[in-house]
Image (cartoon, rainbow, N blue to C red):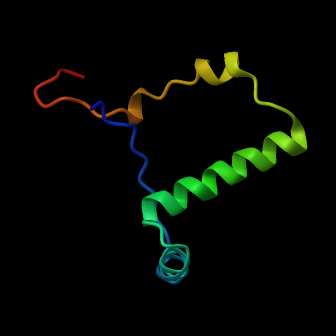
């Protein structure tokens, strides 16, 4: 299975505790809770401002977030 891109986020302890509370209440893992929040945010943006330009989206360089295989030259 192909690994997905990774983004590391620093989060204050009190906010992390609140997110973990939400996770427990919603019966989601932190990963799934954060993905749901991000999807909701993108959905809200697109409803408020219109669909994102797919051509522009495809132009963003995400190589810094892609996993690398061990021994692979960068």
| Quadrant housing residue 73 | top left
Q: Position of residue 57 (x, y in %)?
A: 64, 24
- Answer above or below: position of 49 versus 26: above
Q: Position of residue 23 (x, y in %)?
A: 50, 73
- Answer above or below: position of 56 versus 12: above
Q: Quadrant of the C terminus?
A: top left
Point 52% across, 84% down: residue:
14
Most foreground residue, 51 or 27: 27
Q: Position of residue 71 (x, y in %)?
A: 10, 26
Point 62% across, 58% down: residue:
37
Q: Quadrant of the N terminus?
A: top left
Q: How many marks?
A: 0
Task: Determine the residue located farthest toward the left in the rendered image.
Answer: 71
- Answer above or below: position of 23 versus 51: below
Q: Could you tell whether 4 is left or right of 67 in the image? A: right
Point 31% across, 35% down: residue:
3
Q: Could you tell whether 12 is left or right of 51 in the image? A: left
Q: Position of residue 41 (x, y in %)?
A: 71, 52
């Amino acid at each position: 299975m192909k690994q997905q891109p990774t983004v590391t986020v620093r989060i204050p302890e009190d906010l992390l505790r609140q997110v973990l509370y939400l996770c427990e209440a919603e019966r989601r893992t932190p990963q799934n809770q954060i993905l749901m929040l991000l999807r909701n945010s993108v959905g809200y943006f697109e409803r408020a401002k219109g669909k994102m330009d797919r051509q522009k989206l495809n132009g963003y360089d995400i190589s810094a977030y892609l996993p690398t295989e061990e021994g692979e030259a960068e």
